[in-house]
Image (spheres, rainbow, N blue to C red):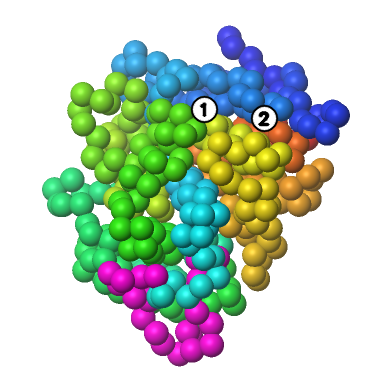
Amino acid sequence: MLMLYYIWENIGGFGVMELIDLNIYELMERYKVTGLSIALINNSKISMAEGFGVLEAGTDRNVNNNSIFSACSISKFLTTVLVMKLSEQGILDLDEDVNKGLTSWKVPDNEFTLNNKVTLRLLLSHQAGIVDPKGSFDKLDTTLNIPKMVDLLEGRTTYCKAPIKVNYPPGSEFQYSDAGFCIIQQLIEDITETSFKDLMNEHIFKPLKMKNSSLEPIMPIDERKEFSCGHKNGKKVGDNYPIYPYPAASGLWSTPSDLAILLIELMNALKGNSKIGLSESKVEEIMTPQGCKEWSGLGVFLDRSKQDIEISSLGWGTGFQCMLVAYPHLKIGAVIMTNTDLEVHQMEGIIGEIYKSLTF
């Protein structure tokens, strides 16, 4: 029976994880989790990466370090890193009216945008006044074509049946929004005249060697060996591999180790050692409270109640739940990914149990 033990301490200015009692397999059985993978970061390095259970119920396809899970909304954290890289290069401006860069589609002007315009900063912090229409942004219907982002924003698809608009004064409220990140994707593609997927490969995946990360909307059958199926109550979900055709919002498939590499990149950037050209100031900006909510950073949630600033991102979709958390200044972090939708918030399930055992 495998036992994992961790406790976090702050020694010499950076974090260390050491042993306390945690039985992963017992937790998986209790919560009916089919497969789970964890990566831990100590001193800006991956100190542990391990898989548990199987990728597909009823098979011997064991989870390992290269097993790929749907990251769901952790995609928004990835998108934020790309935005900060492009803003570092002067390609994007976080505080400019996005309509100045959008050419394929425009945020409709209305009474709420007279004095406050929609900006990248507000979109990244979910404070742009955008509200997702009810029942929108579901997984891909494999009987239909991949939707064009402009059609989605115009409300012409089954994924979003109402046109996207500003519903309250930008900057006045927090409203978690997939549509906001669809606008970000369209803005990036309009300005660069390059696909979002290609930009991510060029600026993030390749230089960081995130070899097990992908934004491909359709998964070739012969490449599914390392991909996990989604599950609920111990059984596979209908599509096996639920896909979300909105890459910037929720299209990422990845591993805990690859996402740990992304967290380590932020830690290294704080010391002037970024591999993708991120400055310390850009990383600090990600971790700075934005607008009307002190717990909302750029593409991440913030918690300042502990020894140092904590950043986190959650992913939850059909058949999958995951979480990443890091203390960039302390050089520690963790990524937990599961192939099971527990139908409760992450903090109320197995991910919450593991996270709480890691809290110092």
The picture places residue 31, in percent across and down from the top left corner, at 51, 31
Q: Between residues 262 and 193, which one lies in front from this camera angle?
A: 193
Count of marks overlaid on the render: 2
**Residue 161 placement: quadrant:** bottom left
> Do the residues bearing badges 1 and 2 touch, measured as CB atoms within 8 Å?
no
Q: Is residue 91 visible?
A: yes
Q: Give the residue drawn at x 39%, y 59%.
A: 188
Q: Amino acid at mark 1?
A: Ser
The kind of secondary structure the magenta stretch mainly shows is loop
Q: Between residues 14 and 295, which one lies in front from this camera angle?
A: 14
Tell me if residue 7 is in the magenta stretch: no
Q: Amino acid at mark 2?
A: Ser
According to the picture, the residue beneath numbered tag 1 turns out to be 257
According to the picture, the residue beneath numbered tag 2 turns out to be 44
Q: Is residue 191 left or right of residue 126?
A: left
For the residue labelled by badge 1, is the local secondary structure a helix, a strand or a loop? Answer: helix
Q: Give the residue drawn at x 34%, y 16%.
A: 61
In the picture, the quarter occupied by the N terminus is top right
Which comes sooner in the sequence, label 1 or label 2?
Answer: 2
Residue 192 higher or lower than 280, as above or below: below
Question: Bounds of the magenta span?
Answer: 101-122
